[in-house]
Amino acid sequence: MGFDLQRIALPSGVELDVAIAGDPANPPIILLHGFPESHRTWRHQIPALAKDHYVVAPDQRGFARSSKPEGTENYSPDKPVADLLALADHLGIGQFTLVGHDWGGAIAWMAALQHPQRIARLIIVNAPHPLVFQRSLFDDAEQRASSQYITAFRNPDFEQFVARMGIPTFFDTSFAKYTDAAALAPERDAYIDEWSQPGTMTGMLNWYRGSSVIVPAPGETPERPAWLDAPFPPVTQPTLVIWGMKDTALRPVQLAELPNYVPDLTLVKIEDAGHFVPWEKPEPVTAAMREWLAKR
């Protein structure tokens, strides 16, 4: 694969497996995966980016063989943001480019908004802006319907549901059918190995349970949070958003309002890819990243 996998203990209280590639003297870029994956989300991008960047791709807390602290409170988004900054500090990285997909993208949005002195550039891949996403869950029926899986993941009995069917069957019936099956097939054993590590299924699901995102049921009219209609700070970094347009979990409504909150925005739509576009269509994703970074 062209990278080392290192075990790194962080002062944020976790040990993470971290893929590292490239020359440390080159500009640093940190890649954050999402659910239900690992650093392998970026298996196609890491070698390409390592040609002229110092590439760091952790297995985030709760995933694969990284630490899995008990309790949903240890998976609120501020915790992985702290992991991210602690990891950069450990590696002697000051400012860096931050890339995130899915939950990794949610953490990337938050880190960019809260720590602009550390994150110089931002690349988001199929991960919604926090305000746009929460607002869409109240205002867009299609997005609300598409997000009901979050409520299912928050059910404390979900792990028992998976255990009853077995992880291989869960993979084949509840994950593979939402992706590019041909692109996914060679990775089946790796996913099953990662998900079978003690505590991993709970650790991964705890990201949803530790989140404050409100997912109303279809037809429900809960009280609307005031912050959805209040001023919201802009993302100050140059930002590239890459989006697989066949994503069935995150609808195109996530893109419409982005220019209002991301003044320096470049949007690249990949029409024939779904949510897992980093490995469903790796070539255009990698090309978009490299072309944009070369101009920045």
Image (tube, rainbow, N blue to C red):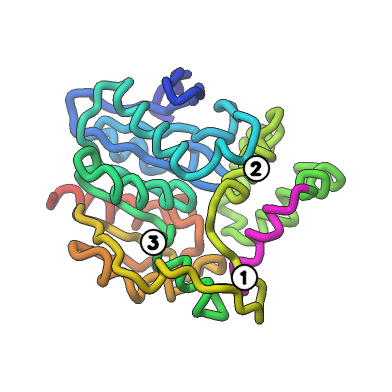
Say which element carries label 3: loop
Q: Residue at x 62, y 40 (%)?
A: 72
Near mark 2 (Cα within 10 A), the count class, few <14, some 14-19 or many ≥20, is some
Q: Are there few (<14), some (14-19), or many (20+) residues within 10 Å of tag 1?
A: some
Q: Amino acid at mark 2?
A: Arg
Residue 154 in the magenta stretch? The answer is yes
Q: In the image, residue 205 lies at what x, y percent? A: 64, 45
Which region is colored magenta? 144-156
Q: Nearer the viewer, residue 170 or 79?
A: 79
Of circles 1 and 2, which is in front? 1
Q: Residues within 10 Å of mark 3 (few under 14, many from 20)?
A: many
Q: Inspect the image, locate mark 3, and give the three-letter code of the amino acid beneath it.
A: His
Pick out the residue farthest to the left.
295
| Alpha-carbon span between mark 3 and mark 2 | 30 Å
Q: CA distance from mark 1 to mark 2?
A: 33 Å
In this picture, residue 179 sits left or right of residue 123? right
Q: Which mark is residue 216?
A: 1
Q: Which residue is mark 3?
A: 129
Q: Quadrant of residue 189?
A: top right
Return the residue at label 2. 188
Q: CA distance from mark 3 to mark 1?
A: 18 Å
Q: Which of these two is toward me, 27 or 220? A: 220
Residue at the image point whose x is 56% and y is 36% from the top = 74
